[in-house]
Structures are given as structure tokens and as C-alpha cells.
Amino acid sequence: MKIIKRDKLKDLLNSFAKNAQTLAPVKENDTIKFLPWKGQGEIDLSQNALLPPKDLLFPQTEVMYRYTDGGVQGEITDVAAAAERQVIFGIRPCDVRSLTMMDDVFMTKGYEDDYYKSKRENTILISLGCNEPQPTCFCTSMGIDMMEADGADIVMYDLGEKLALEPKTDAGEQLLNDVDVLEDGAAEKPVAKECQLKADAEGLAEKLAQMFHHSYWEDLSRTCIGCGTCTYLCPTCHCFDIRRKNIGEEGFQFRCWDSCMFSEYTRMAGGHNPRPSKKERVRNRFLHKLQYFPERYGKVACVGCGRCVGKCPVNIDITRIIGELREVSVDE
């Protein structure tokens, strides 16, 4: 185990940044974001970042290839998927879990997304255990240990005036060996406070498989305003659209984040839309997380980070919905 005093944290990040792009939670305009570390800025480890770091592996906008408009003489140029080495410092256990779900989507079931895979294979994750959850957190209900993070290369503990770093992979151990600002030491793992918010999604997928036409979805959709905030803040949401941009005789194809909460997302070229109203879109959002994803990958597509609970403008709370779905009769 390695130890560093909190007032030496910038020295540690400077050391990482010499050999890899280093992203850290920095407070900017009263908002905590994962930003490239350039030697300056206010590192804030007091709570999780507003936006999950999924955009570091799955950018909000990403060029896929470029082309020239020359008829049969036109050329297509692939955009290199090779990614630079990066270190994500201070990622929370819930967000580490979300990246394992993104791995499922982009690198399993017979398909590998080269753009995502390249970034993922060149990324080192340094997680930070949560000593005190936020009021909207419920990660423990999703089977997450607030101090540990399966999938992280290094697990870090907040000891107050010091931070303790424990390597979990060879890549993590090598990264710590390459810096000279750390001291050898030992420390007891802090005991995290308990999440106040609870949810029990165990076995819910089987019940939801019988509730596609249930009246519950119509009732729930009356509250939703379809803003899509929940999907953009969610660390496991991964809907995207593919678009083209022409500039003179050249152009490029790119993909960008989209949301299943928007009516255009499923609208087809002929005008038909299989999810024409909020009822279908709200239903899809929750069935995807609680039924479809568990059926395909064996896990609920929610990590209990609480971002959607905290930022939904009409207070739609997935923990309350899970509780209601457990109670409602499938025959109603």
C-alpha cells in the first residue's frame, strides 16, 4: 500500500500526467467535473462528479470516418481508433461498475467497438472509496461495495489528511512504482456510512416480463416531461445516433449521444414511430434497465449513483419506481 499526504496530491497528479493524459475531479464554476489535469485547478474529492466519466471512453461526439465527394473516385478515410494512454483519478466505485456494463455493450456478444475498445484498453482507473454517501445514493442496493471497486486498477481510500492507494492490477502497480512522491505504508480501510436510500431490484426482471401492457406505465409517464436529463447523467446509458456532416466536397460521419426519451430517437424514415408517446418511452427506459439488460447481460443497468434522482426536474425517483413495481399486481 502507498500513502500520500493530501497536500501533495497535485504532485502525484503531475507525476501521472508526465506519461499519460490524467483526468481528475476538478471543481469549476461550483461543479465537479472530470477534467484533464494541467497542473492547476481545485481538486475536489468531497463528492462524486455531476457527470460520470463515461464520455472519456464514449465521447458525446466522435468522428468515425471522413470522405470526399467524388462519385466512384471518392475516398473514405478511417479515423484511427488508437487511443492515448489515460489515467482516470478519483472515479467512484459506482462509476467503475458502470464501465464494466459499457464493456458488456461495446465489447461482448460477438461485437467489438474499436473506438471504445481502444480507449478502454489504454485506460487506468484509480477509484476512490466513498466514506459518506450523498442523500440520493443507493449503490449498496445494487451490490456495490462503497470502498472497493471490481474493475479498478488501483483502489484509493480517503484517510482525512492522507490518501492510501492499493494496486489491484499489474498496470496499477506499475503506475504507482513509476512515481516517486508516494511513501510505503499501511492503513485500515475506512468504514463507510450507510446509504439512506434503498431499492430492491432482485428478481424484478421476471415480473416485468409480464407487465409490458400494464397501466402503470401510463400513470408514470404523466409526470415525466421528456427532458432526457436522466439519460445524459446516467453512467450506464449509451444510446447514440449516427449522422453525417458535409463541408464542400468533403465530409465526415460521426456518432453522438442520443436519448431514448426523445421522440425522434425511434422515428423511422417513413415516419412510423414504435414509441410515439411518453408512455412507450418511459416504459422502455425502465424496462431496459430492469428487464432487458438483466436478460441479456445478467445484471441490472443501474449502479445507484443517484444522479437521476437528484437532478430530475419533476422528482422521478427510480428507487420509488422499483418499490412500486414490486408491489403492483401484474393483472391490473
Image (cartoon, rainbow, N blue to C red):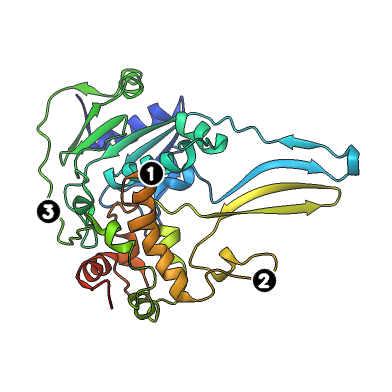
- Dividing the picture into quarters, in which one does residue 186 lie? top left
| Residue at (32, 45) in percent of width and height | 298
* Mark 1 vs mark 2, CA separation in Å: 32 Å
* Rendered position, 210 above or below 91: below
Instruction: Provide the secondary structure element on which disc 3 rests.
Output: loop
Q: Nearer the viewer, residue 329 or 223?
A: 329
**Residue at the spot of label 2:** 271
* Rendered position, 125 above or below 204: above
* Disc nearest the viewer among 1 and 2: 2
Q: Position of residue 3 (x, y in %)?
A: 20, 28
Residue 171's mark? Answer: none
Quadrant showing the C terminus: bottom left
- Dividing the picture into quarters, in which one does residue 326 lie? bottom left
**Mark 3: few, some, or many residues within 10 Å (few <14, many ≥20)?**
some
* Disc nearest the viewer among 2 and 3: 2
Q: Amino acid at mark 3?
A: Glu
- Dividing the picture into quarters, in which one does residue 134 lie? bottom left
Q: Position of residue 232 (x, y in %)?
A: 45, 59
* Horizontal side of residue 317 vs 71, given as left or right: left
Between disc 1 and disc 3, whose residue precedes?
Answer: 1
Quadrant showing the N terminus: top left
Between disc 2 and disc 3, whose residue precedes?
Answer: 3
* Mark 2 vs mark 3, CA separation in Å: 49 Å
The number of discs equals 3
**Residue at the spot of label 1:** 101
| Residue at (35, 67) in percent of width and height | 311
* Mark 1 vs mark 3, CA separation in Å: 24 Å
Q: Nearer the viewer, residue 48 or 35?
A: 48
Q: Amino acid at mark 1?
A: Met
